[in-house]
Image: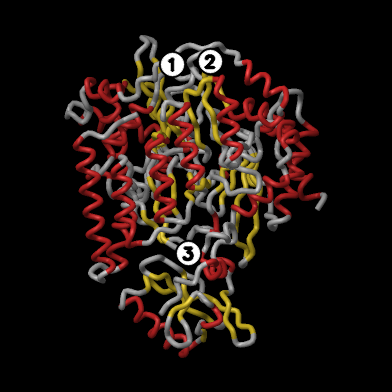
Amino acid sequence: MAKKIIGPQMILGNFLDDGRAVFFTRDHGWSADTSLAAYGEGDTLDQLVTEASKAVDANLIVDIEVIGARVEDGTAYPAHIKHAIQAKGPTVRTDLGYQVSTKWEAA
Amino acid sequence: MYAYDKFDHAMIDTRVAEFRDQVGRRVKGELTEEEFRPIRLMNGLYLQLHAYMLRVAVPYGTMSGGQMRRLAHVARKYDKGYGHFTTRQNIQFNWPKLSETPDILEELAEVEMHAIQTSGNCIRNVTSDQFAGATADEIADPRPYAELLRQWSSFHPEFSFLPRKFKFAITGADTDRAAVKWHDIGLIVRKNDAGEIGFEVLAGGGMGRTPVIAKTIREFLPESDLLSYMEAMLRIYNEHGRRDNKYKARIKILIEAMEADEFARQTEVEWERIKDEHVDVPMEEVARIKAFFTPPPLEVLPINAPAVEELSKKNFVFASWVKNNTNAHKVPGYVNVTISLKPHGGIPGDATAEQMDLVAALADEYSQAEIRVSHEQNLILPHVALRDLPAIWADLDDAGLGTANVGLLTDMIVCPGLDYCALANARSIPIAQAITKRFGDMKRLQDIGPLKVKMSGCINSCGHHHAGHIGILGVDRKGQELYQILLGGSGAEDASKAGILGPGFDEHGIVDALEKVVAVYLGERRKGEEFLATYRRIGADIFKEAIYDAA
């Protein structure tokens, strides 16, 4: 059973076509830019999950994962290193990861 | 090399067409991810942290220059210009798009390659000795048997949904370069007293969270009975292997629970029942497959090459490369060249498209168009004339492939770790880079001598840390990556499980700890004694004291 996450959380998914890790945004889109990511807890989070799940039904996102967030100055960052790496791309071959491209940005 | 017949071609082409249809239905939303996931996995397609990953099979680690050139093309056209060679002698592409994977598989099928059964709870790519058919120390080339197993296990209806994944390894030599004792089934080619070829059959080996060394189930199995006996073993596993808990589902757990003698007894009973049911192919078919692996006609050459000797005197790195990266071929005047994919500071197992193209060109010119992939994540040019070594090394060195570290500390097996893998707990690659930079001085490496360091980013052990003379295991402690050291493992014929020394270190501390382990070895070793022998003689305590007491 997954550990219960305490505190603010954000929603992570992968685009269906290229698998790119992206976050559910405040304007209910998807982006790799964590500064745009929505976050919350309790009822707010439940509402975000409901909205984010529509992208799974719409075949845009493979699946969603609710992950712990660290909030600084109103911006959410993934709390765990695994999700931080997903947000930024591999820490090696940074010349080849998604860091160098913006074409994956969700419309 | 084995060449597809019309049945092989039809089988692979049909599968590509089927997968194209399935991908199309997934993209259109006609298949859910839950429905599609087992389908894509059966075709070697994973979803990792950042993207899809396609794992392409290199059966028993043998491929042609043309196939390597096609892999380079795939890397360039569909990926980001590189690929990653794995411990199952496969290659992984880290960035393909879902919608393009059928095109990739179609292009691979044209050169007789595929990604079938590189994932899922089925019989995976059979691995073998990277020097098979080209080494003096083997009883017989194991690849015809590996090919036979490949054909038997491909789309085998009874074994497509086993309790868990299933891995075979086979070697034809007494020196085990294929880690056969760490496999679900390991086969060692043996000769009986009558001089007949057969196999010692081992089963129940594996790494993961429960490392187990395989046990001998049958001392000698006649060559002609290979498939029926394998079928009997798989049936016992398929019937009794646990399906209620994936962590207890491998055959090693079953054999530990029922004990090897009982597993062997049940196998023999089943085998007696089925062995005359035409599971085995006629020996004519075995001979037909063997013919594909006929040794190349090599003219015997002098065992000394003046050009090699001259350059060795002038160039220490070349001399080291000849010493470490080549080994004797069964024909005098020839060697097998191991191309290290472990450049110091680089990513173990990675090769760029340009490097793949170069290796293909070298294979066409110098090694009978043959290339091998080793489970230690290196590439091999077999059948190379000794006199050609200076030219080959010059080309390799220019391309960043001339590292002379094969078998030494920096020739590490390393999994992709948390930089790519969805299962990993910790990064592996940056630690490997730090280690290979720290120990990158060739004179020091030579002085330390043969030493196998193997690292995994989680307990699943894709980096074979249990079998490392020195193993490194990445763990997650409350969100922090820590690295434990293990000592005393072996993946060779003297297989042994490495033991954990103690608490883990952070990413900087692990490199220092490794330095201390090496220092203890250098201080304690006897003349000519390799690391593993020293460890087995003096035990773990002295290493533990050096690492933890001084901290």
Mark 2 is on which residue type? Gly
Q: Taking B546 as reference, is B382 left or right?
A: left
Q: Residue at image x 39%, y 19%? A: B295
Work out how far the residue at label 3 is from the one at label 1, CA to CA, in angstroms: 47 Å
Q: Are marks 3 and 1 in contact (CB under 8 Å)?
A: no
Labels 3, 1: front one = 1
Q: Nearer the viewer, residue B340 or B535?
A: B340
Q: Taking A21 as reference, is B428 left or right?
A: right
Mark 1 vs mark 2: which is more N-terminal? 1
Mark 3 is on which residue type? His
Q: Nearer the viewer, residue B433 or B275?
A: B433
The extreme right residue here reads B550
Work out how far the residue at label 1 is from the one at label 2, CA to CA, in angstroms: 9 Å
Dot 1 alpha-carbon crowd within 10 angstroms: few under 14, some 14 to 19, many 20 or more: some
Residue B460 at x, y = what percent? 50, 51
Disc marking residue B50: 3
Disc marking residue B44: none
**Disc 2 is attached to a residue of which chain?**
B
Residue B493 at x, y = what percent? 53, 28
Q: Residue at image x 41%, y 80%? A: A107
Quadrant where the N terminus of chain B is found in the figure: top left
**Disc 1 is attached to a residue of which chain?**
B
Q: Taking B41 as reference, is B494 above or below it?
A: above
Dot 2 alpha-carbon crowd within 10 angstroms: few under 14, some 14 to 19, many 20 or more: many
Q: Residue at image x 76%, y 47%? A: B547
- For mark 2, give the secondary structure: loop
Mark 3 vs mark 1: which is more N-terminal? 3
Q: Report the residue marked by disc 2.
A: B333
- For mark 1, give the secondary structure: loop
**Disc 3 is attached to a residue of which chain?**
B
